[in-house]
Structures are given as C-alpha cells and as structure tokens.
Amino acid sequence: MYKLIRPLLFAMQPEKIHDLVVNGLKILRDVPLARACVRMLFNYKNSKLEREVFGVTFKNPVGLSAGFDKNGDIYNDMSDFGFGFIEVGTLTPKPQDGNPQPRCFRLLKDEAIINRMGINNKGVKYAVSYIKRHHPNCVIGASITKGKDTPVEQAAKDYEICFEYLYDIVDYIALNVSCPNVKDLYKLQDVTNLSEIIDKLLELRRMYDDYRPILLKISPDIPYTQLDEIIDTILVSGLDGVIATNTTISRDGLKTDNKTLDAIGNGGLSGAPLFKKTLDFVSYIARKTGGSLPIIASGGIMSPQQAKQMLDAGASLVQVYSGFIYNGPGFVKKINKYLVKNIK
Ligand SMILES: Cc1cc2nc3c(=O)[nH]c(=O)nc-3n(C[C@H](O)[C@H](O)[C@H](O)COP(=O)(O)O)c2cc1C
C-alpha cells in the first residue's frame, strides 16, 4: 500500500513532506478515534520483545532515531506507529534555524538520504515545556548538543544546560557529538574534549536522586584507533552506552551519479549505504567490550532482517529513520513481528 502512495509523497521536497506529516499528526489528535485507528493498524505487542537496557524497560527494541521529532512534540503520536522508544532532538540551549533550505535530499537509487539540516530546533526550553504538559506514553530519550555558535572549548556548558533542563523528564540522554552538519562538532569526539563534557555531566548526575542513563552517539567516519579511545573513555567514565552511528560524509559505493551528488553538495548520508559500516562498528564495539556496553544500532536498517542482524551482532536496541521513510508506517510492526518469529 505505502509503495503505491510513496511516489506521490516523494514528489514533494523531503522537508516539506516532513512538515506536512508533523502538522498532520498534530491535527489527527483532535479527530475522534484517529489515533486509536493508527494504534490498531500499526502497534504490535508481544512479551518476547520486551527488554531492560541500561535500567530502562522497553516494550520492544525498535526506536525512532534523533532528528525526526526534532522539537520533542510528536513523541506520543510517533509511538502510535509501534516504536519502543523515541529519541527527541537534537536540542540546543537556544532555538536555531539550521542551514538554508534546501537541505535534505533523497537518493532513490541508493535508498538513502543526504541531509545538512544543521540541528534546526526550537531550543531545549520549548521541548521541556511541551514534555511537562504532555506525559510521554513511551520511553523517550533526548539528544543534546552545543549551539552552532558555541566554540568547542565552551561546548561542555551547552551540554550541561540541556542536561539540567531535561534530566527529570526523559528516560535517557544522548550526547550528539557526531553530526557532520555542525562546524567543528566532530572535534568533540577527541577524547580530551569528550572527557571534559562527560566528566561535567557525570558530576552533575551525582547530585540527583534518580539515575538517568547517558549515551554517546558516535560518527561512522572515525578511524578504529579513535573508536578504541572512545570506547575506553566510555568504559572508564561509566557512561551507560553508545549509539552507533550518526550519518556519514562518505559517498563511497553509491549508485547515484556524481553530477547529482555534486549538485546536492555537503551533508550526512543515511539509509541503505550506511548499513555495513554500522554493522561493522556494532560488532567491533560488542567484541571489544565483551558485550558489557549497551549499544543502540542506528544506520541503514532498511529491513526486518537487517534489524535482527544488528541485534545478533551485539546491539541491545535498534533505531530507524531512513528505513521508516522508505518503508512507511508499517515498518516498525514488520520488524517486531519478524523478531518475534525469529528470536530464540
Ligand atoms: C533528516 C535527518 C535529520 C537528522 N537529524 C539528526 C539530529 O538532529 N540528531 C542526530 O543525532 N541524528 C540526526 N540524524 C541522524 C539519524 O538519527 C540517524 O542516526 C541516521 O539517519 C542513520 O540512521 P538511518 O540510516 O536509519 O537513517 C538525522 C537524519 C536525517 C535523515
């Protein structure tokens, strides 16, 4: 069914259709029974899917990656599509517009997306105010990062601000240090910069009665030597897990021609071409940590079989973004049904 209407949806610019969907979901809230119908169609429950990871109970292991619910105001609507958890954000201390449009492009031949949104969001205070007024009926994580104009040396302060606003109202916090569309953000993956941020947040966490897991989202573009250093930093500091991975700046092996790619320009690539790199990272981290570090696999999961491959490689949870765009609203249910049939 979705495959039939997809060409119509894909005739529009990706960001336009995303805005339409977000606004459409908000309108559906006022249509009697609409959300119940969505839940009836797309939700799938089975106790075999439930799991506890970093102290949080998930009804199923399939989450929505950061970047879809950018402002943290459609997590309940999106959970109707069967997601086990929603990662809202990425949020910054102040609202920011992101890069000029157009900034999001589909590569149909590759089942991929290139985006250079630049962390456009309404700011952490907007999200906090919304979440406080609308109790989440699913697990929600919040992805946070520094503001675009904040120099790398002062980045820790921005993470602290977002962290303190969100601590009491979300289930976990993800540190985005890997978005390729924010100038110099990748530098925060250098262990000196990273340790400063992590140490500050862990110190802050000790002041709270409740425990919130903190995860680090890494880039697929870092070399393995740097990945080793990051894993060591995570293990020594006591961070709770890793999200592997964000989008890539690589254009290797794409079917889309160079002329089209040149016309699109810079941006992070997601979707099918990212799968192998993500799977390699997930397997490597799981092996290196002996399975002791919870991993959320994010990148290129375009089929239920690929979701299972990530879990088999050592991920505790998976996240999808491009797969949801290309496969449609039934994708999460399809993955979960497949997992129930195939999980031993
Ligand atoms: C349009 C778009 C916007 C995104 N925005 C964010 C973001 O704000 N923060 C973040 O951590 N990741 C962001 N991502 C990356 C996704 O969360 C995910 O890690 C990546 O797309 C790989 O997964 P996929 O292949 O399933 O799409 C974005 C991805 C896309 C396509």
Image: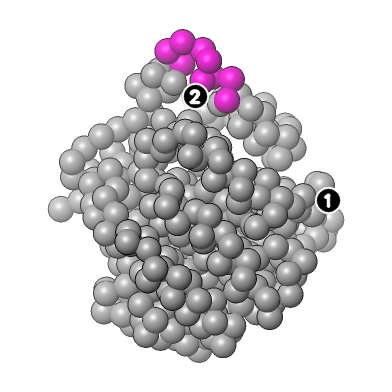
Any part of residue 135 in sight: yes
User: Which residue has dot 2 on it?
Assistant: 1
Q: Nearer the viewer, mark 1 or mark 2?
A: 1
Q: Nearer the viewer, residue 260 or 217?
A: 217
The image quadrant that residue 219 belongs to is: bottom right
Could you tell me the amino acid type at mark 1?
Pro
Q: Secondary structure at mark 1?
A: loop
Q: Residue 195's x, y, as percent?
A: 51, 83
Q: Which residues are magenta?
A: 26-34
Mark 1 → mark 2, Cα distance in angstroms: 34 Å
Q: Dot 1, crowdedness within 10 Å: few (<14), some or many (≥20)?
A: few
Q: Magenta stretch: residue 30 in it? A: yes
Dot 1 or dot 2: first in sequence order is: 2
Q: Residue at x 47, y 33 (%)?
A: 134
Q: Is mark 1 within 8 Å of ligand 1?
A: no
Q: Residue 100 got which mark? A: 1
